[in-house]
Structure formats: C-alpha cells, structure tokens
C-alpha cells in the first residue's frame, strides 16, 4: 500500500466515529419521525399505521392553519418593519458621539435578557391592571386600555411587538459590524467623485452591507417560523387560536394532546416549509449581492 492510500485509509478511519454518531443521532431519528408521521401514536405502545391521515388533517386543524398564518405574519412584519428599523439604528449607532458605547450597550441589552424573564415581566405589564394601562390612564387615555394579552384583537400584535423589542437590537449589532467593516477610503474616494448623503449609502454602504443583509433576513425569517417561547409563556396560543404559531401548535399536539404521530407530521411540514423559504430567501438575497 503506497503512502497516498495509507493517508486515505487513515482519513476514513478517523471519520467513522463522527459519521456513526451523526447517523445515529440525526438520520435514524429523522427516518423514525417520517414513519411516525404516518401513524396514530400516543408515545406509548405500538404505532398504528394510518397513511396520509395526519397530513390531510393538518390543513383542517385551526391550530395548525392559524399557527402557520401567524408565523407568516410574524416573518413578514420582521422583513418589512424590523429590518429597516435595525438598519436605521445601526447607521445612527455607527456615528461617533460621546455616549456611543453606552447607547449601543443599552440597545443590545434586550438580547441578553432571558426570554423567560422578559416574558414574565412583559406579561405582568400587559395585564389589564398592569403598568401599560396605568400609564395610559395617567395621560387620560382610559378609552384605549385593554387586557392586551386576553383580547383576540390585541394578543398577537402584542407578541409581535415584544419580538421586535428583542430582535431589533440583535439585528442592529450585525448591521453595525458590517458597517464598521467597510473601508473608509471607499467613502473618501466616492466623495471626491461628488457623491454625498443618500448617494453614498446607495452606492457604497448598501452593496458592501449585502452579506449582513442576507444573514439578518435569514435569521429573521427562520426565527419567526420557529417562534415558540413568547406565545407559549404569555398566552399559550390564546385567546382561541389568535396567537398560535406553527411551532406552538406542534408542541401542544405532542405534549398536551399526546398525539405524537400527528405532531410529528406537523413538525415535518414545518421543517420542509423552513427549508423551502430559507432557500428561496437566500438565493434571492445572494443574487442581489452579485447584482449590487
């Protein structure tokens, strides 16, 4: 056996343990999940094969359909509102001013706060007798006070606003890192050519920032489709199905209703949906990077 073959054999030998662990803890559970999604199974006993029944019922279940619709609304809100605000904040924070470090830290603070703690605090503040309504009452706005999390009209918008409160700082920090990586001599060269103000942003900043835009949009979309913590802690999907997300619907089907076969079908649909949306979004933004 020559040296090249020995090196190849050694490489394969070293890869075997990692490949075995990956197959055991990823592919085997994944294939098992596909099988369980075609069964009626409570998590105990022998699964009963039911064919496509679980998948057919997904589209009739209001928890799943409303959860999917709410997840899409959250993703759309993140793309249209959260990202422009995060980019605007990053551009402002990138300027040199005396209290810049303090303001950047304050802006990032919601990201490091435990989501459970933040949910409990905000949950108390949004109660009918909570701080938000007390402040509104102080300014003579009693007519707009609500039980924000107990009302069908306001529960999901309240959750969306809380996700933005936490996510905007995180996205802004990514944009800020991208902005600070842009060489200053590019701006100086453009200014010599006569570019000013928004023209500098459009011709220099935005094209150089597109890799950060791709990352932030990806995190925004996937984060919205996977949203679970906030609606689970604050409303558990209620009132009715008004604040359900798709991930929460899958969780409740498995651990509240003990319908593991049906929940697995929902989980597989969610995974496929995330993969399709992610590929579409990444291909669109990567193409934009090249065009710009």
Image: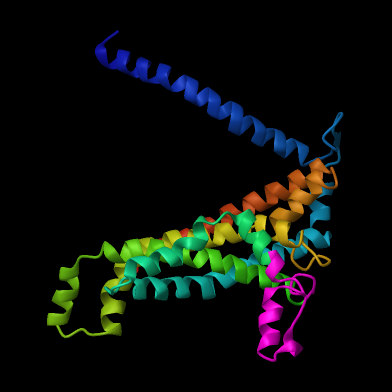
- Of residue 54 and residue 105, the one placed in the foreground of this image is 105
- Of residue 241 and residue 239, the one placed in the foreground of this image is 239
Q: Is 256 drawn above or below residue 241 in the view shown?
A: above
- Magenta region: which residues? 123-152
Q: Residue at x 27, y 17 (%)?
A: 4
| Side of 49 relative to 130 (left or right) | right
- Of residue 191 and residue 86, the one placed in the foreground of this image is 86
Residue 200: give x, y in percent of width and height. Answer: 26, 79
Q: Single out the residue that lies furthest toward the top.
A: 1
Q: Residue at x 84, y 33 (%)?
A: 47
Residue 227: give x, y in percent of width and height. Answer: 64, 57
Please identify the quarter of the rendering in which residue 119 is found: bottom right
Residue 245: give x, y in percent of width and height. Answer: 71, 60
User: How many discs appear?
Assistant: 0
Q: Is 186 drawn above or below residue 199 in the view shown?
A: above
Residue 160: give x, y in percent of width and height. Answer: 63, 69
Please identify the quarter of the rendering in which residue 236 is found: bottom right
Residue 215 shows up from this direction = yes
Figure quadrant of the N terminus: top left
Q: Residue at x 64, y 30 (%)?
A: 28
Q: Residue at x 71, y 79 (%)?
A: 133
Q: Single out the residue that lies furthest toward the bottom.
A: 140
Figure quadrant of the C terminus: bottom left
Residue 213 shows up from this direction = no
């Amino acid at each position: 056996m020559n040296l090249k073959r020995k090196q190849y054999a050694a490489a394969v030998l070293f890869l075997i343990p990692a490949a075995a662990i990956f197959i055991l803890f990823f592919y085997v559970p994944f294939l098992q999940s596909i099988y369980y999604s075609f069964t009626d199974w409570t998590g105990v006993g022998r699964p009963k094969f039911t064919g496509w029944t679980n998948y057919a019922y997904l589209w009739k279940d209001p928890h799943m359909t409303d959860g999917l619709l709410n997840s899409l609304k959250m993703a759309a809100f993140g793309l249209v509102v959260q990202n422009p605000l995060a980019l605007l904040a990053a551009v402002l924070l990138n300027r040199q001013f005396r209290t810049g470090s303090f303001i950047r830290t304050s802006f990032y603070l919601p990201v490091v706060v435990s989501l459970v703690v933040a949910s409990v605090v905000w949950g108390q503040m949004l109660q009918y007798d909570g701080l938000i309504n007390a402040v509104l009452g102080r300014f003579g706005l009693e007519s707009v006070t609500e039980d924000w999390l107990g009302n069908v009209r306001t529960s999901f918008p309240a959750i969306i606003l809380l996700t933005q409160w936490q996510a905007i700082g995180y996205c802004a920090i990514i944009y800020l890192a991208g902005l600070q990586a842009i060489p200053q001599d590019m701006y100086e060269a453009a200014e010599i050519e006569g570019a000013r103000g928004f023209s500098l942003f459009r011709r220099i900043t935005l094209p150089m920032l597109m890799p950060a835009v791709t990352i932030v949009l990806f995190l925004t979309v996937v984060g919205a489709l996977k949203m679970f913590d906030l609606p689970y802690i604050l409303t558990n999907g209620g009132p009715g199905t008004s604040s359900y997300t798709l991930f929460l619907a899958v969780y409740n089907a498995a651990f509240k209703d003990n319908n593991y076969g049906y929940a697995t079908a929902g989980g597989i649909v969610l995974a496929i949906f995330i993969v399709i949306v992610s590929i579409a979004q990444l291909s669109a933004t990567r193409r934009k990077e090249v065009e710009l």
